[in-house]
Image (cartoon, rainbow, N blue to C red):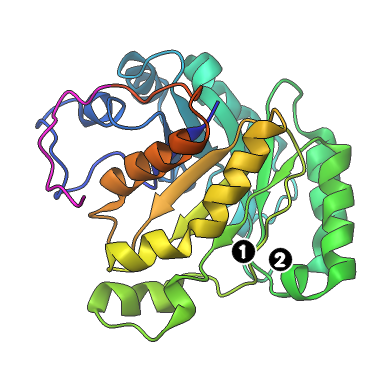
């Protein structure tokens, strides 16, 4: 199974109704990054609404709140983690992974803290970790140490591939903004579990974005042949085109994997077409 999606489920440029935008989004893609949970633990009623608007085979990758990852740095967070996991319980099987995005200052010297956090984390959830400190990407020993920590918890390493974004200097406000905010780290192609997750960001140019993901197409086809179930999130600097790009990526994979389950049929089928 291949899951594709975007960094959000609503955007002014997308063809969505005024209400139940998530339901509309879920007719285009079968996964989404839940970034809103970074700012606060959602209410149970909000999560129940998310579940009601999506089919059982839809998948959320839910980001842990910043109080856990950035303010407390994974220390003394048992109560906050339990409250968060209780809050997202209405998602049921839609909860694909708990996304632990760590700050750029979280370095290889902090791996003991991550190991302790994962060891104590409640069972029954899939955990995936995103690191941004350059040493994890530039130092093979640091990468190997992180992989060992993750392997003990059967957790995945989420790479954020910004190579295409940084391939040449920005040409728009959105690209300049992304240059300032996104991590500039080496590309990573190694999966640790049966459920690899990749975040890919392109550029304003659709052609450049597609050209840059050629390696990812080959990688996903390979993962599928191994029996893995990858999730790929497609970003652009302003994300206006990411909805179409996510579907186009899935279509590209399906050309090499004819048995791939199709995406749903959009309920609002008239977006600004790119292809």
Q: Is residue 255 above or below residue 68?
A: above
Seen in the image, is 216 located left or right of residue 251?
A: right
Quick check: marks 1 and 2 in contact, CB under 8 Å? yes
Which secondary structure is most common in the magenta stretch? Answer: loop
Q: Which residue is mark 2?
A: 106
- Residue 72 screen position, x and y as percent: 66, 54
Q: Which residues are magenta?
A: 265-275
Q: CA distance from mark 1 to mark 2?
A: 5 Å
Q: Residue drawn at (57%, 22%), measured in percent from left and top?
A: 86
User: Which mark is on residue 121?
Assistant: none
Q: Provide the secondary structure element on which disc 1 rests.
A: loop
In percent of width and height, residue 178 lies at 38, 72
Q: Nearer the viewer, residue 264 or 130?
A: 264
Nearer-the-camera pick, 174 or 164: 164
> Is residue 196 in sight in this rendering?
no
Instruction: Estimate how packed mark 1 is, as few (under 14), some (14 to 19) or many (20 or more) residues with alpha carbons within 10 Å.
Output: some
As drawn, is 261 to the left or to the right of 269?
A: right
Percent across and percent down for residue 6 are: 38, 45
Nearer-the-camera pick, 148 or 101: 148
Residue at 27 percent of width and 45 percent of height: 244
Residue 245 colored in magenta in the image: no
**Label 2 environment density (alpha carbons within 10 Å; few <14, some 14–19, many ≥20):** many
Report the number of discs.
Answer: 2
Q: Which element type, helix, strand or loop, lies under badge 2? A: loop
Q: Is residue 180 left or right of residue 158?
A: left
Write the residue at 38% across / 63% down: 209
Q: Quadrant of the N terminus?
A: top right
Question: What number is the disc on residue 103?
Answer: 1
């Amino acid at each position: 199974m291949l899951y594709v999606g975007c960094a959000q489920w609503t955007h002014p440029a997308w063809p969505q109704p005024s209400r139940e935008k998530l339901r509309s989004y879920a007719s285009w893609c079968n996964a989404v990054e839940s970034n809103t949970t970074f700012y606060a633990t959602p209410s149970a009623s909000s999560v129940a609404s998310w579940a009601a608007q999506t089919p059982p085979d839809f998948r959320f990758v839910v980001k842990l709140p910043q109080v856990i990852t950035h303010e407390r740095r994974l220390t003394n967070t048992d109560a906050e983690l339990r409250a968060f996991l209780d809050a997202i319980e209405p998602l049921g099987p839609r909860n694909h992974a708990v996304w632990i995005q760590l700050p750029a200052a979280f370095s290889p010297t902090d791996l003991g803290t991550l190991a302790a956090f994962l060891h104590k984390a409640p069972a029954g959830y899939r955990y995936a970790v995103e690191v941004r400190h350059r040493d994890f990407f530039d130092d093979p020993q640091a990468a190997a140490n992180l992989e060992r920590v993750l392997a003990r918890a059967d957790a995945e390493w989420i790479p954020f591939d910004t190579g295409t974004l940084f391939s040449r200097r920005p040409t728009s406000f959105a690209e300049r903004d992304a240059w300032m905010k996104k991590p500039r780290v080496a590309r990573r192609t190694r999966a640790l579990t049966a459920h690899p997750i990749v975040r890919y960001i392109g550029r304003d140019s659709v052609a450049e974005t597609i050209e840059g993901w050629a390696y990812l197409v080959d990688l996903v086809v390979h993962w599928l042949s191994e029996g893995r179930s990858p999730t790929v999130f497609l970003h652009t600097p302003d994300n206006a085109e990411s909805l179409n790009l996510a579907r186009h990526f899935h279509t590209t994979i399906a050309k090499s994997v004819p048995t791939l389950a199709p995406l749903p049929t959009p309920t609002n089928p008239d977006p600004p077409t790119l292809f």
